[in-house]
Image (tube, rainbow, N blue to C red):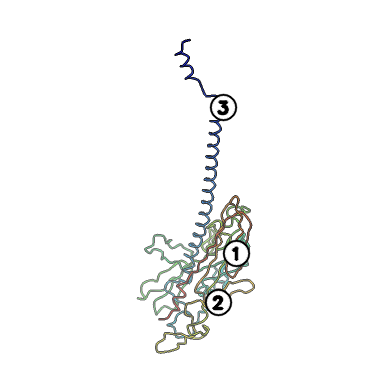
């Protein structure tokens, strides 16, 4: 073999075993680093997704509740006489009792007095599921129940495309603007004969809306452990009855729900409200300051209705603001996380520490009831 051939073969020689092992080791180190980076990135993305979902669920819950609560006490053009500062006589429609919020519609049960109480008490709250036991099922312990009432903001057949057409058998509210009408309003399934100001055109009718909000201890199946904000609505059932329908889930992961009420029971002059008497004006000539009517602003601390200290009809008719506390929880626990925080849900007290792997975030909002507070504001 000549020298040229020997040199060619030397140039074609492969890697030695040591060099191959070094290369494999370096490759494994790089691969391990890439796998670790991928795992950490995936874990971080999952944690961000859990946190974002929890925050969005809390915000959505607040938005849903605000959109309904802000309409509480809206009755179209009707203003209850006890909240009408232009009235001169003793109010005849002030609530005299806390209405049963889940009474199925029946002309025998829905008396004139009961309807007056419904109109005058648009918001009710309870600290336990001792109310509406056939509607509120599997309520999560230590959560409140909220009932909201009002007429539907839109008019069937009006400009809003999202407003349902009139359905026979549904409950509707119609208020009068005609001085010759014998009734101020009608809350019924038929008999809507009231008129507008021209005493010729039929007055608008609006659907009567009542919703119950509470937290159930599961989302889909009992025992799944996902607390869920629920809503039951008063409507026409498949059997043709007017009653609360089966509650439907709204938002998953809502673990805490507390309700506090802002009560306007003191007037601008500091005197207590008194709806058993006609409006008393500090100056009868200017009529700018009623001494026995509220001023639209909650007085003192917000109140929580409890079984031991229930709110009275006098309290509930004077609600001008609602404060809500919502504790949102992630659907799944986070690896390596322990929730040692304590969450303050107003007068109801603290919740936690839970000492588990779930992430949580507390939401709080105060909602002014313009349909009630606005009537009480004087120039």
Say which label, 1 or 2, has the lower sequence index.
1
Q: Secondary structure under badge 1?
A: loop
How far apart, in angstroms, are the residues tagged by discs 1 and 2? 21 Å
Q: Cβ–Cβ below 8 Å for labels 1 and 2?
A: no
Image vertical order of residue 195 relative to residue 215, above or below: below
Image vertical order of residue 51 relative to residue 189, above or below: above
Q: Which residue is mark 2?
A: 315
Foreground mark, 1 or 3, reads 3
Q: Where the C terminus falls, by quadrant?
A: bottom left
Q: Which residue is mark 1?
A: 143
Say which label, 1 or 3, has the lower sequence index.
3
Q: Where residue 367 appears, x then y in whole percent? A: 49, 69
Q: Residues within 10 Å of mark 2 (few under 14, many from 20)?
A: some
Q: Secondary structure under badge 3?
A: helix
- Circle number at residue 18: 3
Q: Residues within 10 Å of mark 3 (few under 14, many from 20)?
A: few
How far apart, in angstroms, are the residues tagged by discs 3 and 2? 88 Å
Q: Where residue 258 appears, x then y in whole percent? A: 57, 66
Snapshot quadrant of residue 178 = bottom left
Most foreground residue, 214 or 98: 214
Snapshot quadrant of residue 326 = bottom right
Most foreground residue, 370 or 112: 370
């Amino acid at each position: 073999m000549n020298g040229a051939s020997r040199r060619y073969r030397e140039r074609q020689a492969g890697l030695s075993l040591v060099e191959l092992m070094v290369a494999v080791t370096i490759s494994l180190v790089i691969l391990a680093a890439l796998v670790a980076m991928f795992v950490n990135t995936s874990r971080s993305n999952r944690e961000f997704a859990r946190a974002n979902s929890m925050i969005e669920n809390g915000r959505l819950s607040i938005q849903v509740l605000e959109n309904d609560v802000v309409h509480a006490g809206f009755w179209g053009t009707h203003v209850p006489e006890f909240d009408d500062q232009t009235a001169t006589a003793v109010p005849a429609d002030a609530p005299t009792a806390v209405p049963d919020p889940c009474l199925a519609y029946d002309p025998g049960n829905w008396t004139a007095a009961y309807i007056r109480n419904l109109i005058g008490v648009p918001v009710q709250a309870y600290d336990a599921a001792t109310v509406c036991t056939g509607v509120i099922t599997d309520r999560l312990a230590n959560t409140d129940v909220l009932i909201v009432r009002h007429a539907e903001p839109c008019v069937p057949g009006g400009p809003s495309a999202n407003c349902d057409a009139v359905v026979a058998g549904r409950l509707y509210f119609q208020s009068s603007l005609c001085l010759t009408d014998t009734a101020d309003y009608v809350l019924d399934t038929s008999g809507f004969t009231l008129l507008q100001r021209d005493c010729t055109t039929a007055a608008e009718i609006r659907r009567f809306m009542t919703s119950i909000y509470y937290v159930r201890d599961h989302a889909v199946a009992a025992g799944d452990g996902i607390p869920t904000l629920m809503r039951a609505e008063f409507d026409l059932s498949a059997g043709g009855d007017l009653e609360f329908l089966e509650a439907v889930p709204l938002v998953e992961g809502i673990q805490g729900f507390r309700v506090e009420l802002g009560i306007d029971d003191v007037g601008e002059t500091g005197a207590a409200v008194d709806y058993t008497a006609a409006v008393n004006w500090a100056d009868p000539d200017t009529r700018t300051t009623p001494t026995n009517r509220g001023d639209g602003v909650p007085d003192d601390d917000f109140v929580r209705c409890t079984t031991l200290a229930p709110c009275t009809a006098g309290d509930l008719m004077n609600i001008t603001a609602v404060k809500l506390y919502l504790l949102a929880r992630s659907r799944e626990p986070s690896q390596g996380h322990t929730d040692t925080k304590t969450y303050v849900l107003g007068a109801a007290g603290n919740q936690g520490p839970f000492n588990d792997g779930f992430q949580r975030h507390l939401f709080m909002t105060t909602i002014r009831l313009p349909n009630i507070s606005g009537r009480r504001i004087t120039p």
